[in-house]
Image: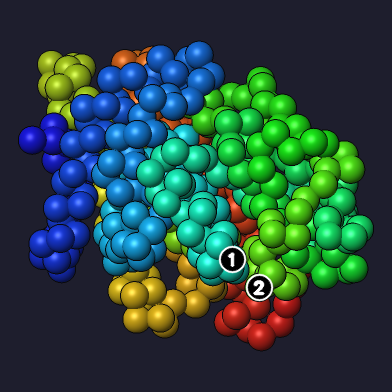
């Protein structure tokens, strides 16, 4: 049985189907048994625990909502969200790996690829026999991805790619990169395979956050891409943004996992830490922090649950996904900071997960759309007035 009890102040478990509870339980046990015992070591060393990939594949964590004919689990959106929640309870880097593999690599191949591309790549990615990455962000273009300068030029039956991408999860270890470039002024998707001449993916070092995750640059210098590696159904900025909506959905759930891990650590510590001859949980200021934590976790769970149900009905809007990502990550980071305060000096030790989650969430708050950009996405939706520039 999982050692983690979970947080369910509003009895949301009663709204989950048996299969959804089973999925969560299975991934929760995986995190307890295989992630938590090793994650602090990998975080300290700045390494990704790649030995976990086969077990994650065996659990169906890659492309889990895609069809079974590609070796995928055909989960619904809520079950998928619960996997992201539990993986991030372990570490943002573990969730990021699965999120990129699923939402940013398998999803675009499934959505924009031809049958040959889908038949070749999706089973390999689902089984963990291939690793993928997603190249949109550039050194000078983050919040404004439409300004990207990576270019593709058609020459005969090949495309020549030139440019660079930055902050790419899994880049150095990826077997295939889904890369976005401008072809005759229009954004198109390309599959760039590891070992392609002119393509390199140096790892970025010196991170204080997401240390148990591989973050890379992608560099293209007269990189030759065959016609068979073009995602022909892509066209315009809408294509990569569709992928980001899938990933942001997973982030909204994942942030709940980080928040729960920090709250659980703070609650247990407060109940057992004795000061002035009583547990610090008996003091009003400590209780105020704990109440604020469980309240925001509950609100985040409600957002995720309804968003997942809307997604399965085909009714979820990207603006609703932005609201959930924005809200849940913001409050998860605030919860991590409050938990550190409750733990006092002990909060900075790797005996507890709090400081690691806090550092990771600093990155999660700004990647795949900063807090400010998601504010403006929702702001435009409710006012009808764009305020991006």
Q: Secondary structure at mark 1?
A: loop
Residue 347 position by quadrant: top left
Residue beneath the point at 44% across and 27% down: 50
> In this orientation, which residue lies closer to the viewer: 153 or 107?
153
Q: Give the residue pinned by disc 1.
A: 113
Q: Secondary structure at mark 2?
A: loop
Residue beneath the point at 34% across and 75% down: 312
**Can you give x and y, in whole percent of width and height, for residue 107 in the image?**
50, 61
Earlier sequence position, callout 1 versus callout 2: 1
Residue beneath the point at 38% across and 25% down: 51
Q: Is residue 52 shown left or right of residue 217?
A: left
Residue beneath the point at 85% across and 64% down: 183
**Quarter of the image where the C terminus is located:** bottom right
Can see residue 294? yes
Q: Is residue 94 shown above or below 280?
A: below
**Can you give x and y, in whole percent of width and height, for residue 161 in the image?**
84, 49
Q: Give the residue pinned by disc 2.
A: 233
> In this orientation, which residue lies closer to the viewer: 224 or 242?
224
The reply to whether the C-beta atoms of the residues labelled 1 and 2 are less than 8 Å apart is yes
**Can you give x and y, in whole percent of width and height, for residue 293 in the image?**
31, 46
Residue 53 position by quadrant: top left
**Quarter of the image where the N terminus is located:** top left
Can see residue 337? no
| Whole-number angstrom distance, CA of label 1 to CA of label 2 | 7 Å
Q: Is residue 164 shown left or right of residue 306?
A: right
């Amino acid at each position: 049985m999982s050692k983690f009890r979970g947080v369910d102040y509003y009895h949301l478990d009663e709204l989950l189907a048996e299969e959804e509870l089973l999925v969560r339980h299975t991934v929760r046990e995986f995190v307890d048994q295989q992630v938590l015992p090793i994650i602090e070591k990998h975080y300290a060393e700045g390494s990704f625990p790649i030995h976990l990939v086969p077990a994650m594949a065996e659990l169906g964590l890659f492309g889990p909502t895609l069809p079974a004919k590609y070796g995928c689990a055909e989960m619904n959106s809520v079950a998928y969200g619960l996997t992201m929640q539990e993986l991030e309870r372990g570490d943002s880097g573990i969730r990021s790996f699965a999120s990129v593999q699923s939402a940013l690599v398998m999803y675009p191949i499934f959505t924009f690829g031809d049958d040959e591309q889908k038949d070749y790549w999706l089973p390999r990615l689902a089984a963990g026999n291939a690793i993928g990455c997603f190249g949109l962000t550039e050194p000078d273009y983050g919040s404004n991805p439409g300004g990207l300068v990576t270019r593709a030029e058609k020459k005969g039956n090949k495309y020549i790619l030139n440019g660079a991408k930055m902050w790419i999860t899994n880049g150095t270890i990826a077997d295939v990169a889904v890369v976005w470039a401008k072809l005759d002024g229009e954004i198109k998707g390309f599959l760039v395979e590891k070992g392609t001449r002119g393509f390199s993916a140096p790892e970025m070092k010196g991170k204080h956050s997401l240390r148990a995750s591989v973050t890379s640059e992608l560099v293209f210098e007269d990189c030759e891409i065959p016609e068979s590696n073009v995602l022909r159904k892509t066209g315009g900025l809408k294509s990569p943004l569709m992928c980001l909506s899938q990933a942001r959905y997973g982030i909204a759930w994942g942030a709940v996992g980080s928040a729960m891990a920090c709250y659980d650590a703070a609650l247990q510590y407060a109940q057992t830490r004795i000061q002035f001859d009583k547990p610090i949980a008996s003091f009003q200021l400590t209780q105020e922090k704990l109440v604020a934590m469980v309240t925001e976790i509950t609100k985040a769970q409600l957002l995720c649950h309804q968003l997942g149900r809307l997604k399965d009905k085909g009714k979820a809007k990207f603006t609703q996904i932005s609201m959930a990502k924005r809200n849940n990550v913001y409050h998860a980071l605030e919860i991590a900071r409050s938990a550190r305060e409750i733990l006092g000096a002990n909060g900075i030790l790797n005996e507890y997960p709090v400081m690691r989650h806090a550092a990771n969430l600093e990155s999660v708050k700004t990647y795949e759309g900063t807090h400010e950009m998601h504010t403006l996405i929702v702001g435009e939706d409710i006012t009808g007035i764009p305020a991006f520039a």
